[in-house]
Each structure stands twice: as C-alpha cells, then as structure tokens.
Amino acid sequence: MEADRRVHVDVEVEFGLSSISDLSLDSDSTSTSVVVPAVARFSRDPSGVPQLRFFAGGWEGTERDIIGFDIGNVQIFQLGPVQSVCMTGQLDKSKENIYSRGFKVQFKAEEESRAFHQKFKQWKEEFVSQEPRVSNGALATSRSKFDEKIEASSAKMYFHYYGQLLHQQNMLQDYVRTGTYYAAVIENRADFSGRVVVDVGAGSGILSLFAAQAGARHVYAVEASEMADYARKLIAGNPSISERITVIKGKVEEVELPEKADILISEPMGTLLVNERMLESYVIARDRFLVAEGKMFPTVGRIHVAPFSDEYLYVEIATKALFWQQHSYYGVDLTPLHETAFQGYFSQPVVDAFDPRLLVAPPVFHIIDFTKVQEEDLYEVDIPLKFTAAVGTKVHGVACWFDVLFNGSTVPRWLTTAPGSPTTHWYQLRCVLSQPFFVMSGQEITGRLHMIAHNAQSYTIYLTLSAKMWGPGAEQGGILQTSTGKFDLKEPYYRISQPQAYQVSQDQQQHPPFQPQDLNIQPQDIEETELLEPAQNSGIDFS
C-alpha cells in the first residue's frame, strides 16, 4: 500500500499586517472597508484541513475574526514589495450563490511579505498533497487557473454560447470587426510570413485562416468550446492552407503546444473591453506561448469614458419601476418594493448606440498594454475621472467605449467602437445614475470608475461623479454635489437600436458634436510612459 504522503507544516503561524481592505462584491456593499491593524493566521479546522484566516486588531486574545477560507480555495498574488491581493470564491447561503471576494493585504515590511508568501506556498502544497490520487500518480481532480477563478456554471454557459454557429455568425457579420482584423493581418504580411501563430480562443477559426493567408508557417488554433469541431471542418474546406493550421481543443491555461509562437492573434474583447474576462486568458497565453519580443494582435486597448446627458433614457429607466407603485395590484400593495426595483433598474448598464452629441465633455481614456499588463492587474481596473463641462446641462452618468490597436510593422490599424463611428456588435455602454445633477459650462466634474472582477466572468462597476464648486468662492475648492452608482456588467440592459435623431430637451443647451476620428494619438506613442496612465483628455475636438 502506498505510504501516507501527508506531511503537516507548522501547527499555527501568524503574521501582523498594517491593514487589510475588503473589496466587497456582494449587493449590500457599495464601498471598500479597511481594517487596521490586522492579523493573518494559518491554522487547521477540526478535521485538519489547512485554512487561512484574517483577524482585525492585535494578536490572539484581542482580535476579531473577519473571515477565513480553506487554503485550496484561495489565490494570492503579489502586487508590490509589501502589498498582495487575496482572491477566493465563497458561498453566500442566504442567496444560494457563489461570489468572488477579494482582499488587499498590506504588510509592515518586505521581509514579512516574503515570509508570508513562502508560508502560503508550503501550506498550499500540503493541501494539494492531501487531494485524492489515481494509480498513475496524477491528481484525480485537476483544476486549471481558469477553473480556480471562474464559477463552473458561468464557464459552462459561456462555452455553450460560443459553441453555436449562430453566435459566431453574429460576430462574423460585424463587418467593422471582421474587416479590420482582415486588414490588420493582410496589410502586415511581414509580421506573419514564415512565423508561428497562436490563435487564442479561435472560435470558427476565421483569424487562423487570415494568418495562414498572410503566409504563416503554422497556426495553432486553440478553442475550448464545441466550436473547435466546426473550426476543423471549416479549415479542412480550405485545402490550400489547411495543412498549416492545427486546431487544438482546450483552454489556453491547460493545453500544451509543440513550439513557441512568434505572434498571438485573438479577439478577446467584451463589452467595455473587459467583460467576459478573456483578456486574462490572452495575457496567460502571452506568458505561456509567446517568444520574447513576439507580437500581439491586438497590441493595446483603451477604455474611453465621458459624461453624458440623456433625459429620455433616464425617464425610460425610471418608468420601468412604476409598476411597483401600485397600491392595489389584485388587492396587493406593491409599493414596499418600489425603491428596490428602482435601484435595480439603474444597476443595469445600458448597451446601445447613441448620438455623440449627448456627451457633455471630452472623454478621458485608460490604456491597457496587452504586451506588458499582468493578469492580476485585470482583477481590478481603476479609472480616475476629470472633465470640464462643455455645456450647461444635467449629467445623467458616464458613457464608455473602447478601441484596440493592431501595431503592425507595416500598417498600424485601430478598431474603434466610439459613438458616431460605424456601429459594431459591441455598441457602446452607459452607466446611468439614479440621481443626476446639473453642471454649468466650464464646471469641473471629477470622479472614479472602479471595476472589480468577479467569478461570473464579469465585473462589478462602482461609479462616483462629483461637480466642483462654481462661481464666487470656487477657488477655495470643495465638492458641490456627488452621485454614486453600482452596476453589474454581467447583467446589462440591451437597448439595441440605431441612434435616433438627436433632440435637445428643455434643460439642455446645444453644443457641437465631437468627431471620434479626431484622435490625437499615433501608434508609436504607445511606448510613451504617460500613455500608460489614465489620460486627462483623449484629444477629441470639442471646439
């Protein structure tokens, strides 16, 4: 009989922390709580399972238990010399669903941070050594990095959706998307000719076929859904290039390839660029498969944010909750649920195409450089906001869109989803505040768009907008009014229609439209350090 491989490490170990920040994702929380000081303790439950627990206060006897996890459900990533983030999935029994929780941990010294990570590694190895094994020594249940951070039911629905031809057709018939990818590849043959290419999340295999048309020596098309079988059939139907394409069914986090790639190609963008969390898989593929100095198509992504005014949209959303204002619906008073329903409708981001003249100020943008960003950086996206109103009107929230750059050696290409540009299947996204506010022309608007990833392959969005003092005494600073909102990117309101003719409501002043193509950025600028930070102004002309 096989000897017992279990070797217990220390019975209990504690580490003093400067602070711990709870990045709450449950629906009852709208802010991040910070506890100082705190303690992290490695221990075991009564059955001997290794655990990591966090306590508020000092050492044992004086602390208050915050939360604890089994070591097997925890991932820890180092953000800096004395800062780490702890990610876990947890069951909320009151709501009968699994949700993500994240904690930022601040250590007192770099030495303590190193010791903590070393100890976590030891305890994690002990947990793995206790998992059931099969006769050949492989783990009976193996979980990839994808499986550890994504809820199983979400992943099942995700791969089922993209395994259907009708959804692939929807993307293929987005001619802005497909045509831009084709142009980016064919116009940059020098980057593909004679090179090894990995297509991350290949879907129907269309990008793999483009790469082969551009002269790639070999293309590995990695696809985890049932669409991999359709991709093989489509590729086999193009015999002139099919011998240079290999379809591999599996996740990029799990598959093994026979050689490194010179170039990665993928379409990892979701709504607001980050939805579906495929960018993380794109980055993992970079780290696993791409040679040093290899190319990535796309190379860079930008999230644009601007305040907007749209009284018609606001009234449309608010009106939905009127149903719950009935005092006698078949003899039942529905009004106790009106406020909850009202806030619920405003928690849905709106996905549609809108007239760019609804924007109140030039946008700011936040850059994600796919060649440099770390996977952990995408768990939390924080965008500071600062605008100057170009018109006096009511601000109803922020509008968001994205673009990506294919930084080819011959012809750099942008793919944009900006309002006023040809509409794509991504459309644009708007976060509508339940409490809008007025601004004057020239008034400063500040705030924050804070997105936190959760294990349903999406993000919770926290938006804060404030209008600064205006008029006499304004030079002393101060905030005049503030409005906040919490939105679930996983559950948007799809208000899909063609942009309607713009009408100026009574509380709006007409102002010139901006032109999305008037972007003051050159592809070579992506190397500049200042562009890697959220910009104050995208260079769009509002004059």
Image: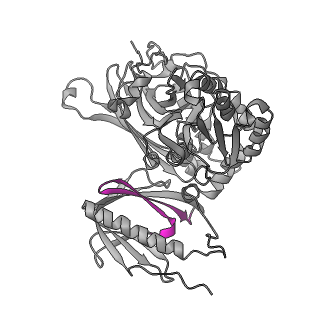
Name the residue nearer the viewer: 187 or 47. 187
Residue 410, horizontal then vertical, whole percent: 51, 21
Q: Is the magenta stretch mostly helix, strand or loop?
A: strand
Up the image or down, 452 lies above or below 440; here it is below
Name the residue nearer the viewer: 91 or 213. 213
Up the image or down, 164 lies above or below 416; here it is below
So how many labels did they put on this image?
0
- Look at the image and give the residue range highlighted in magenta: 69-94
Q: Can you tell which quarter of the image residue 95 is in? A: bottom right
Q: Can you tell which quarter of the image residue 22 is in? A: bottom left
Residue 63, horizontal then vertical, whole percent: 31, 73
Name the residue nearer the viewer: 330 or 227. 227
Residue 224, horizontal then vertical, whole percent: 67, 49
On whether residue 77 falls in the magenta region, the answer is: yes
Up the image or down, 129 lies above or below 154; here it is below
Residue 35, horizontal then vertical, whole percent: 31, 61
On whether residue 410 falls in the magenta region, the answer is: no
Residue 66 visible: no
Q: Single out the residue that lies furthest toward the bottom.
A: 1
Horizontal placement of 494 versus 474: left or right?
right
Q: Quadrant of the N terminus?
A: bottom right
Horizontal placement of 233 versus 277: left or right?
right
